[in-house]
Image (tube, rainbow, N blue to C red):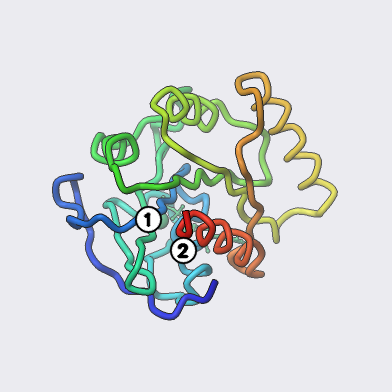
């Protein structure tokens, strides 16, 4: 799919403030610094669209970007930021929690996972919570430019084994690098399929 236009629409601190729309939304979540904002910029081919930072906790609000005047990409604040990462359950602001659970036009939530590290309790408990609340999600393993192909395959297998202890099947998943632009066509094609219903 070709992205012709990508426009920042609004930053919101509550679901009530989010754009009033029936257009579909595809949102990005995951621990702080995992690469959510970078992935949105890579997908849209605009390095300046979403704000990125080397320091965790950059994105603090719900950010809507209108794509091709037809659907939204939504950048969300990360969870597990700073000291709360010591907790084994994920912790984040309540408006983000409400957004992912209540937003009726959110068609899919991309849960970003750092491809370099072993499964973390915080990510697993987050996905369990999404499953229990019937939130449709898929996984993106990020920053694959920082790991060898062999190590990536091994880490994904470890992840699958861990997921299959909880679920009957592995959710749809992708691998990405915002630096090398890996995963772009796969993720956009996946969205296109959902757009076509
Ligand atoms: P918060 O908004 O704080 O929750 O973080 P985020 O998940 O939006 O992460 P962000 O996109 O701001 O990126 C965090 C850091 O990781 C930045 O220094 C990025 O340059 C870097 N980064 C993101 N994606 C990649 C990637 O695919 N490869 C590499 N090597 N670095 C990446
Ligand atoms: Mg961000």
Beta carbon of the mark 2 residue lies under 8 A of ligand 1: yes
CB atoms of marks 1 and 2 within 8 Å: yes
Q: Earlier in the sequence, mark 1 or mark 2?
A: 2
**Rendered image quadrant of residue 168:** top right
Where residue 1 appears, as percent x and y from the top left, is: 54, 71
Question: On the picture, is 158 further left or further right than 121?
Answer: right
Is residue 98 placed above or below 163 in the rendered structure? Answer: below
Instruction: Report, in whole angstroms, how far the alpha carbon at label 1 lies from the one at label 2.
Output: 7 Å
Q: Which label was assigned to residue 40?
A: 2
Q: For numbered disc 1, what is the local secondary structure?
A: strand
Q: Residue furthest front?
A: 197
Q: Give the residue displayed 37% in from the left and 55% down from the top.
A: 75
Beta carbon of the mark 1 residue lies under 8 A of ligand 2: yes
Is residue 161 placed above or below 57 in the rendered structure? Answer: above
**Rendered image quadrant of residue 69:** bottom left
Q: Which label was assigned to residue 75?
A: 1
Q: Give the residue displayed 30% in from the left and 60% down from the top.
A: 64
Q: Give the residue displayed 40% in from the left and 47% down from the top.
A: 107
Where residue 124 appears, as percent x and y from the top left, is: 54, 28
Q: Residue furthest right?
A: 150
Is residue 83 or residue 17 the one in the foreground? 17
Where residue 32 appears, as percent x and y from the top left, is: 44, 46
Other residues around mark 2 within 10 Å, as few (<14) / some (14–19) / many (≥20): many
Q: For numbered disc 2, what is the local secondary structure?
A: helix
């Amino acid at each position: 799919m070709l992205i012709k236009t990508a426009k920042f629409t609004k930053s919101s601190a509550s679901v009530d403030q989010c754009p009033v729309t029936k257009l579909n939304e595809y949102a990005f979540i995951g621990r702080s610094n995992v690469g959510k904002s970078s992935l949105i910029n890579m997908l849209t081919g605009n390095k300046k669209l979403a704000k990125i930072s080397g320091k965790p906790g950059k994105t603090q609000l719900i950010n809507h970007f209108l794509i091709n005047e037809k659907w939204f990409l939504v950048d969300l604040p990360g969870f597990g930021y700073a000291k709360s990462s010591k907790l084994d359950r994920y912790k984040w602001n309540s408006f983000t929690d409400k957004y992912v659970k209540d937003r009726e036009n959110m068609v899919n939530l991309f849960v970003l996972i750092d491809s370099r590290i072993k499964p973390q309790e915080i990510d697993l408990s987050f996905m369990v919570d999404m499953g229990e609340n019937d939130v449709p999600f898929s996984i993106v393993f990020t920053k694959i430019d920082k790991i060898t192909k062999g190590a990536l395959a091994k880490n994904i297998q470890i992840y699958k084994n861990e997921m299959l202890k909880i679920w009957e099947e592995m959710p749809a998943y992708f691998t990405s690098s915002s630096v090398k632009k890996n995963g772009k066509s796969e993720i956009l094609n996946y969205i296109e399929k959902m757009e076509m219903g």
